[in-house]
Amino acid sequence: MKRLGCFIFGVLIVTGVFFVACSLVDGGTTNGNGNGETNEIIPPSLLGAGFFVSADGDDNNDGSAESPVRSLQKAVELAAGDLSKTNIFVASGVYAPGNGLNTESESYSNSGVFIDVGNLTILGGCNNEFTERNGITELDGLGEIKHVIWIDDFDNVTIDGFVIRGGNANDEVNFIDGIGGGIFIYEGKGNIIQNTVISNNTSGRHGGGVCIWLGENHILNAVISDNSTFEGGGGIIAFGGTNHTLSGIISGNTGRSGGGIHLSGCISYIVNATITGNAAVIDPVNGRGGGIFVGQGEGITISGIIFDNEAINGGGVYFLNNSGDELNTSHVFDSPTIEGNSEWGIDRANDRTEPQGLDTVNWGSGNTAGGVTPKNVSWLD
């Protein structure tokens, strides 16, 4: 199986997030710059197999390239009515509630785009002629909708080439509307988020940037930056699910536990990302897992780079295993670099978690605890 690796090579001034190039270890690369911008020709053969969205469109149009619709929701509805067309092409521009995105409505689960059809690829960054993808398509919730994108219980949905921001999952009564401000993925199989920036989204409960609820075989390969939540998973929270892959750059996110990533009851995940500058310090006593929080679950494989994250406990990675007295040895470190994190590189709540592969970790200049370096593994150093 090929593993994804990531590296930073620049800074995007306009949105204040990192460029990222993600490549397969055999030398292949993904399309796009990792800042929501793509650079590729759209083959004419695809144009007849899709619907088209433009900031200059009209939802009374037929959704062709010559007569695009205005809203993403209208394009999704057209795709649901014609399953032979499996692509939606979205022109560059800014789409906001009432101007290309849904306003808050229970009919669409309070989301800017409610996706209730499978086997669908949504491609942003298109020019107005829909011949090339060479720009940036921004979906901005303006803080007015709970989720910018909701992918319902459907399979093989791909989101490619967007900037997703301004989701505000702030509902204190309805749990679902308090999680997943940027993207909410509800169950399903094989959904992919790539060549996308998810930034400046918030939630009152969990998953400021992204919430993954169960499901199988999802791939998230994105820049996830400057999102926040009051509870778990400033960047990403995952509740259960199996065989998901999380990669890209996770930076500058904040939460009570898992400033970058919070995994709860997850099985056989791969986390191979650059995770940096995240914080779990909202709670001055129980802030845990600045980079990654792993709660229960089995078979989490961690690689990539985890540096300069902070927490009250476990600045790099924090393990919580409170499901009985059985020792959990299923989690694996696969040659990550873990350095420069505050209050331990790796920490755990008790002695019932014993991850494998500690001898493969590159500690670099070390991690700190109580102002002392190196303090890499709390139960060994």
Image (cartoon, grey):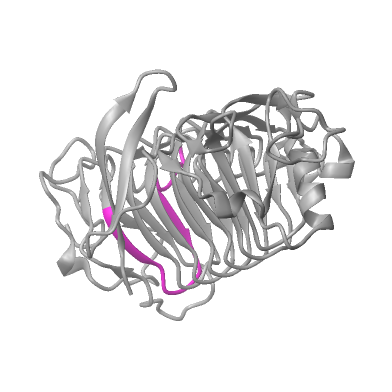
Which contiguous range is marked in magenta? 285-304
In the rendered image, the vertical position of residue 216 relative to residue 31, given as above or below: below
| Front residue (pair 174, 281) | 174
Magenta span contains residue 287: yes
Horizontal side of 107 relative to 255 (left or right) equals right
Residue found 44% across the figure and 22% down from its top: 15
Return the x and y of residue 217 as percentages of the image width and height: 53, 68
Q: Is residue 291 visible?
A: no
Horizontal side of 319 relative to 119 (left or right) equals left
Residue found 43% across the figure and 38% down from its top: 38
Return the x and y of residue 307 as percentages of the image width and height: 25, 42
Quarter that holds the N terminus:
bottom left
| Front residue (pair 375, 4) | 4
Magenta span contains residue 72: no
| Front residue (pair 224, 54) | 54
Quadrant location of residue 84? bottom right
Quarter that holds the C terminus:
bottom left
Quadrant location of residue 182? top right
Horizontal side of 148 relative to 280 (left or right) equals right
In the rendered image, the vertical position of residue 242 relative to residue 248, given as above or below: below
Q: Is residue 243 visible?
A: yes
User: Which residue of the protein is positioned furthest toward the top in this rendering?
Assistant: 14
Return the x and y of residue 310 as percentages of the image width and height: 34, 37
Residue found 59% across the figure and 53% down from its top: 46
